[in-house]
Amino acid sequence: MLVGFALVAVVFQIVNPTSGTIEIESQATIETKFSTIQLTQFEYALNEPVVITAYQNKIAVAKRKSSKIDIFSQKGNHLKLISTIELKDILIIEKSSEIFILDLESTRSGRIYVSYLDFYDDARKCDHVKVIEFEKATSRPRLIFTSTPCLSMLNKASEAGGYIMSGRLAVSDTHVYIAGGMSMIDLASNTYPNPNVVGMSGNFKRDLAMSNLYGSVSKIDIRSLHIVKVSTGHRSPQGLAYDPVGDVLWLSEHGPSGGDELNKIKQGGNYGWPYVSLGQPYDNAHLLMPYNTFDTQYSSHSGFIAPVLSWSPSIAPSQLVVVPKKSGFDRSWQGNILLSTLKDMSIHRLVLSKTNDVVLDDERIQLGHRIRDIALTESRIWASTDGGKILLLSPG
């Protein structure tokens, strides 16, 4: 529950081109169950979705409709631009293709991972979700993943199509994990093939088996680049996080009308979509053929791995992080999951049981923005929004 929210000190400025700084736009105080949080807000872009990751106690930030990644450090009341990575200058791409950044992640050693959509908006060509790795911000990238099969969007722009529910990343010392939405199915009417996508065989099980991304979570061995499919049955995953304590992989995903899920991912697990969902269809007609190709059983999860937690009505979960045991943010938050949301415009602090199988408490911390991404530095929580904001949460 949100106890208090006080707004002060408004300054409005995006990146200053001469000094390379972003000044504070506003500050607020938030009272949570056990602590006070200071919320500092910076304006990075104007009404554009932004993704973010921690990078050696700095932050790497990118507009999704961009090929540029900016790295900032916090200097008092402003963010100082340290360096910029321009993907179009270092990637081998065709002149007619475009880039849409899906996610950023980094490791403690300084590796940076970027997932992006390489797309054409041309039915004669096809689009891929790709992942590249930088040893450090100044190094040349290595391509470590390309999605299969090669698909093309029709009737709508690729950057606004089903691909953007794919590409969430999580990293461990040995693997990169990537989550993919069920692009092969029209999620509004639950029909296959998706009438907006071409490049499928027409046999769902065959296409699903051939894909290393869609409707699945896969892991990439950092050394060998060998890809293994970890789990299937995912509808629209928007968050992915690896917790080295207990070797646990967490995923958040959107249900249809309600039925949003927090899933604990198990090797070989099937999480049900498109056969079951704890949500409801968007329309009663979607219970019937031909708009329900799979005879989806709504309000049910029978026969498949159930979520650890489900939300109805929908909160539209996005990214999640696990607060490490040595975090300097708040001792009572250590080991908790922080789940950002879009529709709910909040961060949910999820307190887990010792076995990670039960959520003991779900505290909603209202922020008033559609939160797209969330990241942790040593004693700070950073978030980015669909309106182009960078948010800093620090102990009050």
Image (cartoon, grey):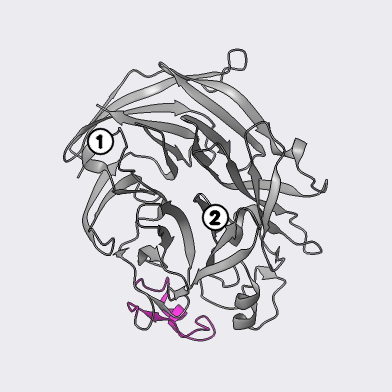
**Quadrant location of residue 269?**
bottom left
Q: Position of residue 309 (x, y in %)?
A: 30, 63
Residue 157, visible in the rendered structure: no
Please identify the dominant SS of the magenta region: loop
| Residue at numbered disc 1 | 330
**Quadrant location of residue 333?**
top left
* Separation of marks 2 and 1 at Cα, in angstroms: 29 Å
- The quarter of the rendered structure image containing the C terminus is top left
SS for dot 1: loop
Q: Which residues are magenta?
A: 278-301
Q: Position of residue 193 (x, y in %)?
A: 62, 77
- In the rendered image, the residue lying farthest to the top is 18
**Quadrant location of residue 129?**
bottom right
- The quarter of the rendered structure image containing the N terminus is top left
SS for dot 2: strand
Q: Around disc 2, counting alpha carbons within 10 Å, would you say few (fewer than 14), some (14 to 19), or many (20 or more)?
A: some
Q: Amino acid at mark 2?
A: His
Residue positioned 49% across, 63% down in the render:
236
Q: Position of residue 390 (x, y in %)?
A: 45, 32
- Left or right placement of residue 164 versus residue 272 in this view: right
In the image, residue 280 above or below residue 287 = above
| Residue at numbered disc 2 | 175
